[in-house]
Amino acid sequence: MDAGQDHGQLAARFRSIARGLAAAALPALAAVLGPAGAHAATRDVWVAAVPQTWNAVPNARDVMHGTTFTRAQTTFPTVVYRRYTKDWRKPVTLAYERRAGATQLTGPLIRARVGDELRIHFKNLDTLREAPHSMHFHGVEYEPSSDGIYLPLHSGKGGAVMPGRTFTYKLTAGRASAGVWPYHDHSQSMEDSIAGGMYGALSIAGRDEQRADREFLVAFAGWHGFQTIDGRAFVGNTPVFRAKVGERVQWDVMAMGDEFHTFHVHGHRWRTPDGTPEDTRGLGPAESFRVSWKEDAPGTWLYHCHVETHMMQGMIGLYRVDR
Amino acid sequence: MRRAAIILATAAALAAPAAAHADSETISMPGKFFDPARSTVVAGDVVTWKNADFATHDVRVAAGLYDSGPILRSGSWTQAFDRAGEYPFVCTLHAFMSGNLSVVAATIEAPQGPVLAGGPLRLSGRAPAGTPALTVERSVGGGAWAPAGDPVAPGPDGGYAVSTPALAGASYRVRGPAGASPALTPAVTARIDVHVALHGRHLEVHAMPAPKGLKATFELYRRWRFRWAEQRTRKLDADGMEHFRLPRGPNTYARVTLRARSGGPVLVASRVLRTRNGHTAPDPDAAGAPMPSGEGHPGGHDTH
């Protein structure tokens, strides 16, 4: 369960009461707000930019080609987004994030529903580069002050949060927000930050949508000469996703960096919105999508970027389906 | 106070071994023999012969270089030895009583038991008091010696202790202004054999030889991660034995690795066995197949 969920439900109750009062005075407004208020929550998420020493190839091998690496070839210091408990007391990884394969390079997988308000409390704890950072979210609604971009003379404090400072981004998951969306640093440090791993995903469910039994995060990005999925390269290092026959699985796919990728899962197909079967879909920088199916194919499968040079540089993983 | 005394005693023992502290040696004559009959001292030491017999004895060193004259019952005679060399001695009154004193420029000792090749070899001993510096030397073949590290400064009493990488088959000595110590060839083992056997769910480990403090780590292969994962680490007992219990779980591979210290480099890995039946299996890490011959892949062969 999301750390902000309890708090969010409580807030939703208050909002509901407030709306009830408003409804008494303004029946016309209540007609618009009422249905949304029944489910919507305010979700507080605590995130910090923190230094991280990251090894993209912890097993030191590309087993498919018999290549080995030294730790020095695969490990570098970087700065990443990390989820924290309230008031940035301590770093935390939620159970659903672990199940989704989220590593500690990719930022937190932030879940919400259409109609939810999101308050992303961001703190810059970058003691490595001591650079300004921000969070810029795709797919959601917000005021320009929560855009998280740096533009001299125009952007506010949220566009360049200086080391040691905090900022709260206020977002709304609107009617057109259902889906998977990237977020990333959009301050003046963004080029280095994104190359180092300062990105993550928002997973926004429809208002009444039932969440899948399994949700997997696949974030394609280059990293220090490797092509990574969730910050890892080569099978055994990239997430090993697991599901059981009969479960509904959802793949959240996004890309960051300068390159195009094609998402491909072996032994499976999904349908496009017009009903066309598909087993490979392309995406460019900051593009994202989610695909879903009911699992019916037990075995060990590969998922990878089908740009072959990317696959050779590590953009490949394993998917285990048990009976 | 008692605790402090123990700590001080321990500190002294670490600074230099107890045997190296002696700057005087006593040779007793409890009967018609010398005890000990053979001694080694450092140049500058003094040696005292004590007559604990009922009969009168004497000591003639090196065919008359030094002569004690008669030593009566309960009497003693002391002589300083400043020059390195061999000093045989006899009692002229009982010609069958003989002994030998070795006077050396410095002593050198190594710990009991085998030491791992490449690991730290702790050498200690004593040089004449006031020696400013000593150099540890290692044999390099053909009777030649080479320094095995920077010069060390002994304590005021001449005691020293130094750590140097252990080399299998090499001899060591220390050289000071008074000359070189005798050569010492410590037991350095270049190879440890580790045997594993599965009995039910008990994995038995036996390492030979087993240098003191050797750590055994039980590892299982994570088939989906393509890597060995450490499960448990234990110190081998004095006989180099230990056992681990296999967890219940999916069939995979198991092995035991030996390290000199936790987290250190792997010295040796056991054979790989199947957890299902204990049978020997190929190392799954070696299964990352290079391309078939004739279809070379960049980095496939030479880096593996």
Image (tube, coloured by chain):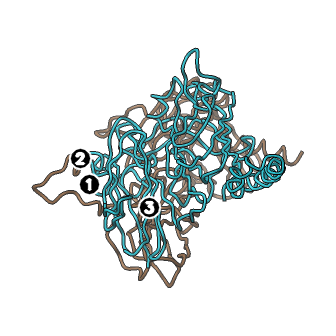
Chain colours: A cyan, B brown
- Left or right placement of residue B37 versus residue A260 in this view: right
On screen, residue B221 above or below A160: below
- Work out which residue is located at the far right of the displayed protein and give it: B1
Write down the residue under mark 2: B299
* Residue tagged 1: A65
Is disc 3 surrounded by few (<14), some (14 to 19) or many (20+) residues within 10 Å? many
Q: Residue visible at 35% across and 50% down?
A: A315
Which of the two discs, 1 and 3, labels the residue nearer the N terminus?
Answer: 1
- Residue B254, compared with residue B229, is above or below; it is below
Say the numbered circle drawn on residue A240.
3
What's the residue type where badge 1 is placed?
His
Q: Quadrant of residue A49?
A: top right
Q: Position of residue A295 (x, y in %)?
A: 42, 72
Q: Nearer the viewer, mark 1 or mark 3?
A: 3
**Chain of the residue under the numbered disc 1 shown in the image:** A
Q: Chain of mark 3?
A: A
In the rendered structure, the residue with mark 2 lies on which chain? B
